[in-house]
C-alpha cells in the first residue's frame, strides 16, 4: 500500500540523479516540488521511456485513469495496482504491456493503530537516497482535456515493513530501471530481488493526517519535534 507520498527534493536534485532523462524543465512547474504530504489525485514527477532507451520526465496525476474510462465514471482507487494481477486486470493490463514508468520519491507514509488513534510513520532510505517505485501510466482524453496519469505497483511486504502494513511498493534498484521500462515481462524477476534493508521507518506528527497540511516538519521523527 502506498497512499501518501513525500517528495522532499528540489528539481535540481532530481536532475542530478537522473541526468539521462530528457525534458527536465518540466520539474520546475510551480507547486510540484518539494512536497511533503502528496495525496492521490495530485501531481507528481515520474520518468518514462521514449524510443531507443531514451527517457523523459513527465508530470503525472496520481491515480491511473484507463483510456476507456467515461468522464462520469472516473475510478478513484487506482493509485496502487497489485503487481500480482496488474497484467490481467482490464484497468492496468494495457499499461503494463506498453506504458511503464518510474516514480522517484523521498519517502511515503503508513499508519498503525486503532481507528481514531492511528499513528503515521515515515518510510525512507537510511542514506537519504530516493526510493524508486515501479509504476504504470496512461493518457486519458476527453474532448480537449488530456491528462497523464499513473499508478504505483505494490507487493506483499517484506522484512521489517510487515510490522506496519501488509503491502509495500515495488522498489527498483538503479540497475533495474532499464529492465523495468523496456523488458516485455520483468516483474517476477524484479519482485524476487526487491531489497528493503536500507529502508528506515519512524513515527511522525499526526499533522500529516490532514492532507491540507504540507511543510518540512511532517517528515521529522516524532522524538525530534519536542
Image (cartoon, rainbow, N blue to C red):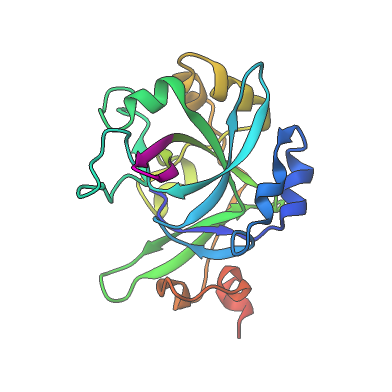
x and y percentages locating residue 4 in the rendered image? 44, 58
Q: Is residue 183 magenta?
A: no
Q: Can you tell which quarter of the image residue 226 is in?
A: bottom right
Query: Residue at left 42%, top 36%?
Result: 139
Percent coordinates x, y for residue 154 in the rendering: 40, 39
Is residue 117 depicted above or below 23 in this figure?
below
Of 27 and 13, nearer the camera is: 27
**Along the line of sight, the residue nearer the viewer: 97 or 85:** 97
145 in the magenta segment:
yes
Q: Say whether residue 20 is left or right of residue 190.
A: right
Residue positioned 71% across, 48% down in the render: 25
Residue 89: x and y in percent read: 26, 28
Quadrant in which residue 219 is drawn: bottom right
Residue extending furthest bottom? Answer: 226
- Left or right: 74 in relation to 105: left
- Magenta: main secondary structure: strand
Q: Residue at x 32, y 76 (%)?
A: 117
Q: Residue furthest left?
A: 72
Q: What residue span does the magenta drawing correspond to?
A: 138-149
In terms of depth relative to the viewer, which is nearer, 37 or 172? 37
Q: Position of residue 195 (x, y in %)?
A: 57, 35
* Residue 143 appears in the figure: yes
Residue at x 42%, y 43% (from the top left corner):
146
Horizontal arrangement in the rendering, residue 48 relative to residue 39 (left or right): right
Q: Is residue 155 visible?
A: no
Amino acid at each position: 500500500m502506498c497512499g501518501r507520498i513525500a517528495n522532499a527534493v528540489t528539481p535540481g536534485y532530481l536532475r542530478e540523479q537522473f541526468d539521462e532523462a530528457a525534458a527536465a524543465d518540466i520539474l520546475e512547474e510551480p507547486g510540484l516540488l518539494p512536497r511533503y504530504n502528496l495525496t492521490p489525485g495530485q501531481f507528481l514527477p515520474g520518468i518514462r521511456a521514449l524510443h531507443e532507451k531514451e527517457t523523459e520526465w513527465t508530470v503525472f496525476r496520481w491515480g491511473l485513469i484507463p483510456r476507456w474510462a467515461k468522464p462520469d465514471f472516473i475510478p478513484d482507487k487506482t493509485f496502487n495496482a497489485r503487481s500480482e494481477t496488474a497484467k490481467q486486470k482490464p484497468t492496468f493490463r494495457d499499461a503494463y504491456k506498453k506504458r511503464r514508468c518510474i516514480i522517484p520519491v523521498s519517502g511515503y507514509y503508513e499508519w498503525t493503530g486503532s481507528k481514531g488513534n492511528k499513528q503515521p510513520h515515515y518510510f525512507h532510505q537510511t542514506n537519504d537516497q530516493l526510493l524508486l517505485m515501479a509504476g504504470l501510466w496512461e493518457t486519458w482524453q476527453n474532448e480537449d482535456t488530456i491528462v497523464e496519469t499513473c499508478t504505483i505497483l505494490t507487493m506483499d511486504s517484506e522484512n521489517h515493513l510487515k510490522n506496519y502494513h501488509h503491502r509495500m511498493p515495488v522498489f527498483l534498484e538503479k540497475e533495474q530501471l532499464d529492465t523495468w521500462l523496456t523488458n516485455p515481462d520483468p516483474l517476477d524477476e524484479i519482485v524476487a530481488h526487491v531489497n528493503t534493508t536500507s529502508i528506515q521507518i519512524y513515527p511522525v506528527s499526526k499533522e500529516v493526517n490532514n492532507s491540507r497540511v504540507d511543510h518540512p516538519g511532517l517528515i521529522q521523527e516524532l522524538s525530534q519535534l519536542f
